[in-house]
C-alpha cells in the first residue's frame, strides 16, 4: 500500500503541475462560477495531501469506499448544486437530505469526510469548505481505483440549508429510462453525453438487490440485447431471505477498478441497474457513445474528466454566499 500511495501522490502532484499550463477546460463556457484551480496552494498548502491521505486510508481498508465517496459528490451536486448540503444532519427544526429516498440507508462515507474536515480545521481553520472536500475526495477515489487524474476546481462554499424534497425529485433513480435520465441531467445543466460519461462511475461500487428489482422481475427482458444467464445469476443472488440487504457488484468483471469495463458489460447485456442497461438497449444515440467508450478507454477517461469538472461547477456557492463550515454535519 505504501508504494502505491506514494505513486498516487506523485501522480496527483504532476496533475496539479500540469494544471498551471494552458488548458482549454478553463475557458469552457460551462465554468460559470468563480471557481479556480489551486486556490489552496498558498492559504492551505497541505489541503490536498490531507484529503488524499484520508481517502487512501479509507479505500485501502474498504475498496468500496471509493465508489461511496464518488457517489456523495454526485448526490450533492444534483440537489441545488455542489454545496455540501448532503452532509447536513437533521435537527429539531431542520430536515436534511440524508433521509431522502435515494440516500437513506444508501449513502456512505460521512465519517471519512468528518475525519478529513477535523484535520483540516486543525491545520487551516475555516479555510477549506466541505463542498471542496467532497469534490476533491471524489477525484482521489477515482485515482486510487486506477482511473484518470484531473485538477479539481476549488472555491466552493457550504450551504446554510438542504432540501429533502429536491433530493427525492432531482437524483436519477435506478430504474430510469433514457428520457428520464436525460431530463434529470439537463435539469442541472448536463448534456446527454455528460450523462453517459458520468454513468461510467458505476464501473466501481455495489448496489442492493432492491435497486435492480426490475431486472430481477423480467420486466422489459424480451429484447435482443437481454443476457438471460446474467439475469438468472442475479435472481439467484437475490433469492435469499436477506435479499433486501444483499449487494451485487455494479461491474462484475473488475469491481474495484475504475476502467471502461462498465460499457463492455452493457454491450453484453450485463448492466446491473435498469438505468445502466438502457444506455445500450434503449436509445441509439447513447448506444453509440457506449460502443465508443467500450472500444477506447482513453476517450472515456477524457470525457469523464471533463464532465466531472462540469458537474463540479453546478450551482457552486462562491464569494460571500454560504459559509465555510467548521463541522460538515452542521451549519456554524
Image (tube, rainbow, N blue to C red):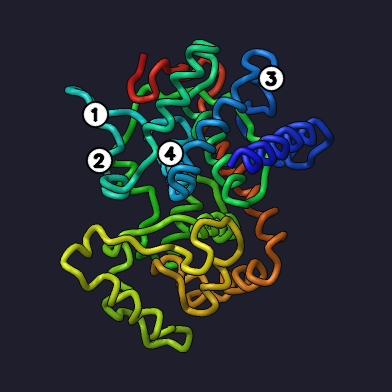
Mark 4 to mark 1: distance in Å? 16 Å
Q: Find out whether the residues at labels 1 and 2 contact each other: C-beta distance under 8 Å.
A: yes
Labels 3 and 1: the sequence-earlier one = 3
Mark 3 to mark 1: distance in Å? 34 Å
Task: Describe residue 305's horizontal placement relative to residue 159 as left or right.
Answer: right
Residue carrying label 3 = 41
For label 3, count other residues whose C-alpha is less than 10 Å away and answer few (under 14), some (14-19) or many (20+).
few
Tell me the quarter of the picture where residue 322 sits: top left
- Residue drawn at x 26%, y 49% is 101
Residue carrying label 4 = 76
Q: Which mark is residue 51?
A: none
Q: Please, what secondary structure does the residue beneath circle 4 have?
A: helix
Labels 4 and 1: the sequence-earlier one = 4
Q: Please, what secondary structure does the residue beneath circle 2 have?
A: loop
For label 1, count other residues whose C-alpha is less than 10 Å away and answer few (under 14), some (14-19) or many (20+).
some
Residue carrying label 2 = 99
Q: Which mark is residue 90?
A: 1
Task: Describe residue 219's horizontal placement relative to residue 321 as left or right.
Answer: left
Amino acid at each position: 500500500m505504501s508504494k502505491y500511495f506514494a505513486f498516487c501522490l506523485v501522480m496527483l502532484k504532476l496533475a496539479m503541475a500540469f494544471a498551471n499550463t494552458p488548458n482549454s477546460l478553463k475557458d469552457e463556457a460551462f465554468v460559470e462560477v468563480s471557481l479556480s484551480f489551486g486556490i489552496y496552494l498558498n492559504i492551505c498548502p497541505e489541503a490536498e495531501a490531507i484529503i488524499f491521505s484520508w481517502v487512501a486510508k479509507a479505500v485501502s481498508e474498504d475498496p468500496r469506499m471509493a465508489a461511496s465517496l464518488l457517489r456523495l459528490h454526485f448526490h450533492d451536486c444534483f440537489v441545488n448544486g455542489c454545496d455540501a448540503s448532503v452532509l447536513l444532519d437533521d435537527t429539531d427544526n431542520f430536515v436534511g437530505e440524508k433521509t431522502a429516498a435515494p440516500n437513506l440507508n444508501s449513502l456512505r462515507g460521512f465519517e471519512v469526510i468528518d475525519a478529513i474536515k477535523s484535520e483540516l480545521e486543525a491545520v487551516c481553520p475555516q479555510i477549506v469548505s466541505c463542498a471542496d472536500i467532497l469534490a476533491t475526495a471524489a477525484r482521489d477515489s477515482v485515482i486510487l481505483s486506477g482511473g484518470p487524474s484531473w485538477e479539481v476546481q476549488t472555491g466552493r462554499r457550504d450551504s446554510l440549508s438542504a432540501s429533502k424534497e429536491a433530493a427525492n425529485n432531482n437524483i436519477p433513480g435506478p430504474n430510469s429510462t433514457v428520457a428520464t435520465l436525460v431530463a434529470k441531467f439537463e435539469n442541472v445543466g448536463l448534456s446527454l453525453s455528460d450523462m453517459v460519461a458520468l454513468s461510467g462511475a458505476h464501473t466501481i461500487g455495489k448496489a442492493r438487490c432492491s435497486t435492480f428489482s426490475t431486472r430481477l422481475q423480467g420486466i422489459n427482458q424480451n429484447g435482443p440485447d437481454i443476457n438471460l444467464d446474467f439475469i438468472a445469476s442475479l435472481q439467484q443472488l437475490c433469492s435469499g431471505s436477506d435479499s433486501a440487504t444483499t449487494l451485487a457488484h455494479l461491474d462484475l468483471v473488475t469491481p474495484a477498478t475504475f476502467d471502461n469495463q462498465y460499457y463492455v458489460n452493457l454491450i453484453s447485456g450485463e448492466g446491473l441497474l435498469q438505468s445502466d442497461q438502457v444506455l445500450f438497449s434503449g436509445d441509439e444515440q447513447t448506444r453509440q457513445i457506449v460502443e465508443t467508450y467500450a472500444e477506447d478507454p482513453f476517450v472515456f477517461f477524457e470525457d469523464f474528466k471533463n464532465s466531472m469538472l462540469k458537474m463540479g461547477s453546478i450551482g457552486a456557492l462562491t464569494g460571500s454566499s454560504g459559509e465555510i463550515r467548521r463541522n460538515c454535519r452542521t451549519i456554524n
